[in-house]
Image (cartoon, rainbow, N blue to C red):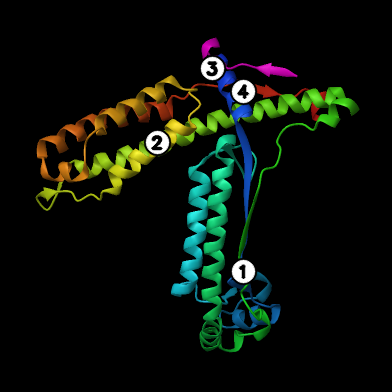
């Protein structure tokens, strides 16, 4: 294997290796999968040809579809809302991983994650059961709206079982039997996995920097300036979301970037003991917090542009083949 190093200080590379090893030994991969009834369907060839006639077009050059159900119905929105909570919980308790559909969760959190996901799956089942009670109503509405495009065959007898969630913890490590069968291939796979965790560290840093920048920028903008001669309105969540970020950062951070650690600590000190109502009632506190956050935001902007350059590992010709 040949390695191309791009002007990165030795201390940074060592820190990154340690952080990657920490992820590899303390985290587990987790995948969340959804079964979801599709509410849209493409038109048939004949229907597209008929629709194309009104535009003087040819059907094979037209893409068209129909909406089977009104997804804005309260019962359907309730189902979608549970899905949103599931995704939010999964992403909130985990770190990104450079393989599609996988994220990293602390091994110590697996039991509580299972409990929470089981609870959310039950909520999803309940929401689907309620949606199913309105299914006839939704089909009747679809028949009226779709006209001749309505096809009873597009709809199942029931929506139960057509929405679901599953999760698993797939291994991302090379299988042990490979070491017996082909030691060289096993070593190659070990290096590939190591590079994946190195990239996971970078992805985690980027995600933390981006989220902190967004949250600080939003609160700073709300605390600064005026609208119609009055201080800008902001919600409690502008502060609460930052505090939730601090907690998640403390739990999931692998201490791979000292600059990021310092910025998070700085932002946390700025908001320590500060309540949203205090910022609304006290102009001095509001201005002080706003000016301090501007400094943090400026440093974050620089951190987003001037990220450390990592080592790039290029496979040899033998490994590629």
- Residue labelled with disc 2: 247
Of tags 2 and 1, the one toward the viewer is 2
**Callouts 1 and 4 close, C-beta under 8 Å:** no
- Residue labelled with disc 4: 21
Magenta span contains residue 257 = no
Q: Quadrant of residue 243?
A: top left
Looking at the picture, does residue 37 appear above or below residue 207? below
Instruction: In the rendered structure, find residue 15 and report the number of the disc placed on it.
Output: 3
Q: Position of residue 55 (x, y in %)?
A: 56, 79
Disc 2, SS? helix
- Disc 1 versus disc 4: distance between alpha carbons? 40 Å
**Is residue 277 found left or right of 193 in the rendered image?**
left
Disc 4, SS? helix
Considering the image in quadrants, where does the C terminus appear?
A: top right
- Disc 1 versus disc 3: distance between alpha carbons? 46 Å
- In percent of the image, x 49 and y 49: which residue is there? 89
Of tags 1 and 4, the one toward the viewer is 4
- In percent of the image, x 43 and y 37: which residue is there? 248
- Residue labelled with disc 1: 37
Of tags 4 and 3, the one toward the viewer is 4
Considering the image in quadrants, where does the N terminus appear?
A: top right
**Is residue 69 found left or right of 298 in the rendered image?**
right
Q: Which residues are magenta?
A: 1-13
Is residue 321 visible in the rendered structure shown here?
A: no
Q: Residue furthest top?
A: 10
Magenta span contains residue 12 = yes
- Disc 4 versus disc 3: distance between alpha carbons? 10 Å
**Callouts 3 and 2 close, C-beta under 8 Å:** no
Viewer-closest of 256 and 313: 256
């Amino acid at each position: 294997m040949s390695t191309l190093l791009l002007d990165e200080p030795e201390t940074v590379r060592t820190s990154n290796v340690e952080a990657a090893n920490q992820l590899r030994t303390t985290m587990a991969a987790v995948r969340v999968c959804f079964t979801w009834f599709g509410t849209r369907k493409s038109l048939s060839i004949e229907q597209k040809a008929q629709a194309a006639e009104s535009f003087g077009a040819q059907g094979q050059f037209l893409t068209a579809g129909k909406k089977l159900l009104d997804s804005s119905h309260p019962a359907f929105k309730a189902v979608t809302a549970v899905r949103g909570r599931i995704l939010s919980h999964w992403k909130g308790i985990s770190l990104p991983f450079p393989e599609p559909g996988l994220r990293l969760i602390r091994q110590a959190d697996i039991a509580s994650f299972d409990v929470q996901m089981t609870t959310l799956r039950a909520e999803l089942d309940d929401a689907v059961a309620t949606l199913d009670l309105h299914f006839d109503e939704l089909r009747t509405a679809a028949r009226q709206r779709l006209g001749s495009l309505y096809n009873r065959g597009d709809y199942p007898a029931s929506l139960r079982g057509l929405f679901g969630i599953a999760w698993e913890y797939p291994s991302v490590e090379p299988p042990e039997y490979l070491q017996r069968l082909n030691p060289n291939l096993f070593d190659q796979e070990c290096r590939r996995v190591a590079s994946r965790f190195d990239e996971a560290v970078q992805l985690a840093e980027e995600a933390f920097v981006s989220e902190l920048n967004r949250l600080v920028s939003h609160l700073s903008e709300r605390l600064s300036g005026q609208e119609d001669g009055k201080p800008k309105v902001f919600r409690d969540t502008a502060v609460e979301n930052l505090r939730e970020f601090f907690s998640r950062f403390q739990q999931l951070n692998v201490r791979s970037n000292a600059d990021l650690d310092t910025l998070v600590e700085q932002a946390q000190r700025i908001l320590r003991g500060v309540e949203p109502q205090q910022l609304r009632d006290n102009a001095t506190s509001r201005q002080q917090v706003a000016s301090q956050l501007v400094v943090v935001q400026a440093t974050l902007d620089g951190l987003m542009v001037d990220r450390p350059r990592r080592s790039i590992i290029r496979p040899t010709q033998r490994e590629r083949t």
